[in-house]
Image (cartoon, helix red, strand yellow):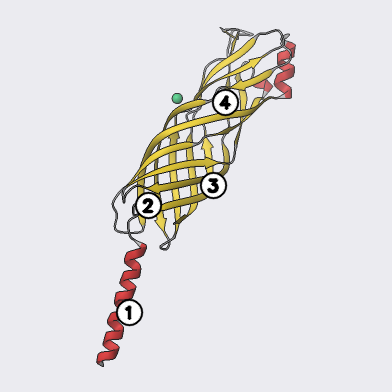
Amino acid sequence: MKTSSRLNASLSTLILSAAVASSAMAYEAGDIIVRAGVTTVDPQETIDPIALDGTTLSLSGGTSSLGLDSSTQLGLTATYMYDSNWGIELLAATPFEHTASATGELVAVGNVVDTKQLPPTLSAVYYFDTSDSFKPYFGAGINYTVFFDEDVSAGADSAFSGLGLTGADASIDNSLGLAIQLGTDYQLSEQWLINASIRWIDIDTEATITFDNGSKVTTDIEVDPFVYTLAIGYKF
Ligand code: NI
């Protein structure tokens, strides 16, 4: 091998290893990572029996409660790196839509209330030191869930009317609680990455349906969902 071609070979090796090293480099202070993808909120609900004016509603000796379905929306996160390990992450999303369906005595009623919710979550995240493209992290933070557009279904409305309760109007309290998560970025290049994460969010609320005569149907709801995200990200 001539000196020049040997030099060329060493140079290309050097450039190649530099490229590999940089694509697997740790995040640095000031990096901003934005991600967009599919986020599913899967409630792991625990819901008290429905009460009418503070007394458990019992039509034939049993009780009634509610169940929640899951919802998938566009999820967005942005992480600002404080140093190579610690960052601050904000989760945002398009509104999730959930239906609360009757269980127990009122099961035949089906859907009772539809609602939308937004669960903005601010977390401290810790990236573990790794030497390859996988960048796993743990996070803990605060969630504030806002419920809105609560709507009593026509079926529930007529079921309540049958009990002499007309003009059903639903509201669901907002919730402030802890959120924890595990996730990983996988760097495709210096800038692009894919991300997967799972969170658990403590969302506790009370749902109230108020009627024309001032009576109220209430129940305490622990939504406590797992939240799954699969996203594409870009590092600035
Ligand atoms: Ni809870």
Upstream in sequence: badge 1 or badge 4: 1
For the C terminus, give its image quadrant.
Answer: bottom left
Residue 120 percent coordinates (x, y): 50, 36
Upstream in sequence: badge 2 or badge 4: 2
Q: Of the residues shown, which amino acid type is indicated by label 2? A: Gly
In space, the residues marked 3 and 4 are separated at their CA atoms by 23 Å
Q: Which residue is mark 4?
A: 67
Q: Of the residues shown, which amino acid type is indicated by label 1? A: Ser
Q: Of the residues shown, which amino acid type is indicated by label 4? A: Gly
Is there a contact, CB below 8 Å, between mark 1 and mark 2? no
Residue 159 percent coordinates (x, y): 72, 16
Q: Which residue is mark 3?
A: 38
Mark in front: 3 vs 4: 3
Q: Which residue is mark 2?
A: 30
In space, the residues marked 2 and 3 are separated at their CA atoms by 26 Å
Q: Residue at x 44, y 28 (%)?
A: 177
Residue 94 percent coordinates (x, y): 59, 41
In space, the residues marked 1 and 4 are separated at their CA atoms by 61 Å
Mark in front: 2 vs 4: 2
Q: Quadrant of residue 62?
A: top right
